[in-house]
Amino acid sequence: MCIRWLIEKFNCEVITVTVDVGQPENFSEIEERAYRIGSVRHYTINAKVEFVERFIRPAIMANAMYEGKYPLGTALARPLIAEKVVEVARREGADAIAHGCTSKGNDQIRFESTIRALAPDIEIIAPVRMWGMSRAEEIEYARRHGIPVPEIHKRFSIDANLWSRSIEGPELDDPMNPVPEDALEWVKPPERAPDRPVYIELEFRNGVPSRLNGEARPLIEIVQSLNAIAGECGVGLIDHIENRAVGFKSREVYEAPAAVTITEAHRDLEKITYTPHEWRFKQLVDMLWSDLVYSGLWIEPLREEIQLFIEEVNRWVSGVVKLKLYKGSLTVVGREGEFASYDKSLADYFKGWFPSDAEARGFIAAYTQHSLTAFWRRRRIR
Ligand code: ARG
């Protein structure tokens, strides 16, 4: 629709770009549609492996979950899509780049921050922010111009890639409304999931999955397999109220079976590996990383700097995690880390720890003294 509008408004040539980040789309159909509407040249760019290696990989190491819930699929793909579009714009000598974001979302920030970083000389046009049509008027505009709009897109705004499928729309705006089942494509409703639990074994090398059920596979294949396996078990549906970067809360629904499974396993392996100090610091850094990525600041130097720390500690995150998936639940049932700081002989509950009663007393006295001093002093004035 933007194509038609840009031609009418600016009387210009429009070149179109689709970046494949693993969304289940028919790309030749998209290309055909672009030409039919008026594109003079269309690019389909396969960026799946790059998406996995440059964006999903660090997200796994950072346990990326915005506000504890959203694995950031859309947020991670935007900077890469923008980068690819800038490359095409340069090759074609374009003087402007247009994107289809509305003024309500975070995506406009994500696209524009990257475009501005890489190509400050190129103008940015956001037709949807400019044309002032309501959703109904947009659908009518499309009809008048013979532009087909798929049924699902009339009800929901959907964005999918290898890491997650985001679902937004008026039917979900009331936070009390349950998610309509026909909006879901990746996660089976638990009540219809298989009646027997599925066990999987995920092996990590330096913080990233390397083997699934004993078989060495590229990360992209592990992600694809887990989307299918965990989704089939009803795992990976997320329904939460999200604080958008643009100033209001929204109800967001995601399907992310692989992201949820991998992150749960990764967190568990980190915990058996890190010292308590590393582990606590990592919680803070992870949250900061997710916040920056969510709010469209992939280009922020701090994102890269804390990512260096995240990669550094993940050097030690190697080992195996066993998970049980059953009718919507996901449970870690075993873990073993090559560099685990867990020591079974120390943990043995039936063996003593302090060599003598006096040593235990001494430790407890010193260890609690800070708190006791304050406790008794403040007690006097309460
Ligand atoms: N709220 C999510 C985010 O900001 C999902 C955005 C999905 N985009 C969409 N066009 N439906 O990352």
Image (tube, rainbow, N blue to C red):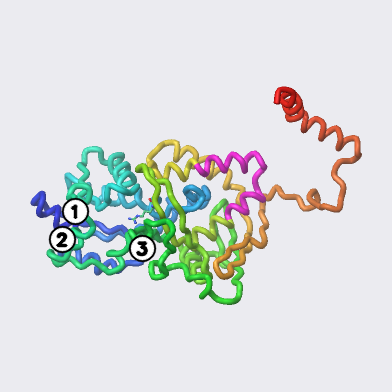
Position above or below: 61 against 148: above
* Circle 3 residue: 23
Q: Amino acid at mark 3?
A: Gln
Distance Cα–Cα, label 1 vs label 3: 27 Å
Q: Position of residue 124 (x, y in %)?
A: 22, 44
Residue at left offset 28%, top offset 69%: 151
Using a 10 Å C-alpha cutoff, classify the residue at mark 1 as few (fewer than 14 neighbours), some (14 to 19) or many (20 or more).
few
Using a 10 Å C-alpha cutoff, classify the residue at mark 2 as few (fewer than 14 neighbours), some (14 to 19) or many (20 or more).
some
Indicate yes or no: mark 3 CB to ligand 1 under 8 Å.
Answer: no
Q: Amino acid at mark 2?
A: Tyr
Q: Amino acid at mark 1?
A: Met
Asked whether residue 277 is drawn in magenta, I would say yes
Residue at left offset 48%, top offset 71%: 188
Q: Quadrant of the C terminus?
A: top right
* Circle 2 residue: 141
- Helix, strand or loop for disc 3: loop
Using a 10 Å C-alpha cutoff, classify the residue at mark 3 as few (fewer than 14 neighbours), some (14 to 19) or many (20 or more).
some
Q: Are marks 2 and 1 in contact (CB under 8 Å)?
A: yes
Residue at left offset 48%, top offset 62%: 237
Give the camera-side residue of 365 and 181.
Answer: 181
- Helix, strand or loop for disc 1: loop
For residue 69, side relative to residue 148 (left or right): right
In the rendered structure, which segment of residues is drawn in magenta?
Answer: 266-287
Mark number displayed over residue 133: 1
Indicate yes or no: mark 2 CB to ligand 1 under 8 Å.
Answer: no
